[in-house]
């Protein structure tokens, strides 16, 4: 258990180092002014991180009193939704950083004295500590989304210092992207084990493992590239209502959407893309990024295809037909994700397709985790064996008919967030996500 404690403590520390590096690089005005109405101020996120940690570790496991009882409402995400957070009386950055440091020091002191209890789901396998790590990684990604929307170039330096680099990675067996970007892989029909029974490092909506039948289908070997999406845009894809669902066409018409978020015209008709305020030529071989579900769905109709369901996506990513068993990662159950996928701030955007050949799934589908989250056709919903834990507001409160599921992981998350069973979600019009998609087709 001593080794596990050291590993969790190290993960907590490494994650906080990245958060503070971002904060130091952000101009003060960026901390308090969100770049869009649906994004809250970063300063609130920082206080929320500390309060979440205080609530679930210090107050639940050691019965400490609240640092400030006012924070219970101020930093409760369900009581203080994003659009109104700019109006809240949030403590200044100096006080917020002091609060974060105070809570974290107490947590690191406490972690060595907590005895895991197999009967207590909060402490079993270090569950609550791993939850805190993942929660902070998710908020780091939200901060990067805000900085991307705001055009904040300082983020590029933080990403580079954390181990990123501008140059795309290529393996020795790199592919000719233009020749293979439309290739697809056939996934056999039949049942497979979807979800997980793994406790440590997973969320309630991933559990438990259950058998799900999926009919045979084909799925793109790679995510849709910028080159392919540019063809759609140049074929008047944004001006043809027959390609869009009714809600999607209303969204396009109302907001005048003509291209993915961040794309800009170039002098020679080759688009440029804005990344954290830096304008660079659009890389044709990279997965398209910052597209909404509406745009992904319209592209699928234009292509004579569809988006995969999340069950199809997970089977393509995790199922190993040789042993009839699902894997934790597409490449297996071991090896840190950063070695086989574009995660962990390696670069400030997606890597070219074919860059991670050794990260392929057993059936040969590539770049399923890392680079961009991938929209699916599925709505976020529960299943008959779902049990909310440790709080229903994480996922159960979002079940219904509004949110679409995304699968995989983006370049902006780190190893603890990477696995085949992880489920992300957002409203179909959202484009701040580091999200793209791949296509699927039925065989019947």
Image: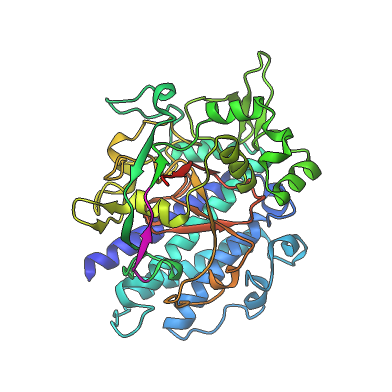
The answer to whether one can see residue 34 in this image is: no
Quadrant of the drawing holding the N terminus = bottom left
Indicate the position of residue 240 as horizontal and vertical percent values: 72, 35
The image position of residue 19, as x and y in percent, is: 51, 53
Count of labels shown?
A: 0
Residue 262: percent from the left, percent from the top?
A: 65, 34
Above or below: residue 203 compared with residue 425 = below
Decide: is 398 above or below 167.
below
Q: Position of residue 293 (x, y in %)?
A: 60, 48
Q: Is residue 418 left or right of residue 97?
A: left
* Occupied quadrant, residue 357: top left
Decide if residue 245 is on the left or right side of residue 112. right
Q: Quadrant of residue 75?
A: bottom right
What residue do we see at 78% from left, 63% from top? 87
Identify the residue shown where x is 50% and y is 64%.
Answer: 101
Colour basis: rainbow
Write down the region rendered in magenta: 208-216
Residue extending furthest right?
Answer: 254
- Asked whether 213 falls inside the magenta stretch, the response is yes
Q: Is residue 67 above or below residue 153?
A: below
Q: Residue at x 59, y 40 (%)?
A: 301
Q: Nearer the viewer, residue 217 or 420?
A: 217
């Amino acid at each position: 258990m001593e080794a596990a404690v050291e590993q969790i403590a190290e993960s907590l520390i490494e994650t906080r180092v990245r958060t503070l590096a971002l904060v130091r690089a952000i101009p003060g005005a960026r901390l308090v002014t969100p770049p869009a109405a649906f994004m809250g101020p970063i300063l609130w996120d920082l206080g929320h991180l500390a309060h979440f940690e205080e609530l679930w570790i210090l107050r639940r496991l050691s019965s400490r009193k609240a640092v400030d009882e006012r924070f219970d409402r101020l930093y409760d995400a369900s009581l203080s939704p994003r659009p109104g957070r700019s109006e809240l009386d949030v403590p200044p950055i100096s006080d917020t950083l002091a609060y974060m440091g105070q809570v974290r020091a107490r947590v690191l002191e406490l972690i060595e004295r907590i005895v895991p209890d197999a009967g207590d789901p909060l402490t079993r396998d270090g569950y609550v500590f791993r939850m805190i790590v993942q929660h902070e990684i998710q908020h780091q990604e939200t901060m990067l989304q805000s900085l991307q929307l705001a055009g904040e170039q300082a983020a590029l330096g933080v990403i580079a210092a954390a181990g990123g680099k501008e140059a795309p990675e290529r393996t020795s067996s790199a592919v000719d992207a233009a020749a293979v970007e439309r290739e697809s892989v056939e996934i056999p029909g039949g049942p497979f084990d979807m979800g997980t029974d793994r406790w440590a490092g997973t969320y309630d909506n991933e559990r438990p493992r259950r058998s799900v039948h999926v009919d045979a289908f084909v799925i793109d070997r790679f995510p849709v590239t910028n080159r392919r999406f540019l063809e759609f845009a140049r074929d008047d894809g944004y001006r043809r209502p027959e390609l869009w669902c009714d809600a999607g066409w209303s969204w396009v018409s109302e907001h005048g959407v003509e291209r993915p978020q961040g794309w800009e015209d170039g002098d020679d008709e080759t688009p440029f893309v804005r990344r954290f305020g830096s304008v660079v030529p659009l890389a044709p071989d990279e997965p398209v990024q910052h597209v909404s579900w509406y745009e992904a769905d319209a592209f699928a109709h234009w292509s004579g295809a569809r988006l995969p369901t999340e069950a199809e996506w997970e089977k393509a990513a995790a199922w190993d037909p040789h042993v009839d068993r699902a894997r934790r990662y597409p490449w297996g159950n071991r090896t840190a994700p950063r070695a086989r996928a574009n995660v962990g701030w390696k670069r400030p955007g997606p890597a070219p397709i074919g860059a991670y050949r050794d990260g392929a799934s057993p059936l040969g589908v590539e770049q399923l985790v890392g680079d961009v989250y991938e929209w699916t056709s599925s709505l976020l919903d529960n299943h008959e064996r779902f049990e909310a834990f440790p709080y229903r507001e994480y996922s159960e409160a979002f079940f219904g008919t509004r949110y679409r599921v995304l699968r995989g992981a983006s370049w902006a998350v780190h190893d603890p967030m990477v696995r085949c069973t992880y489920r992300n979600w957002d409203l179909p019009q959202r484009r701040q996500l580091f999200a793209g998609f791949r296509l699927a087709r039925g065989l019947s």
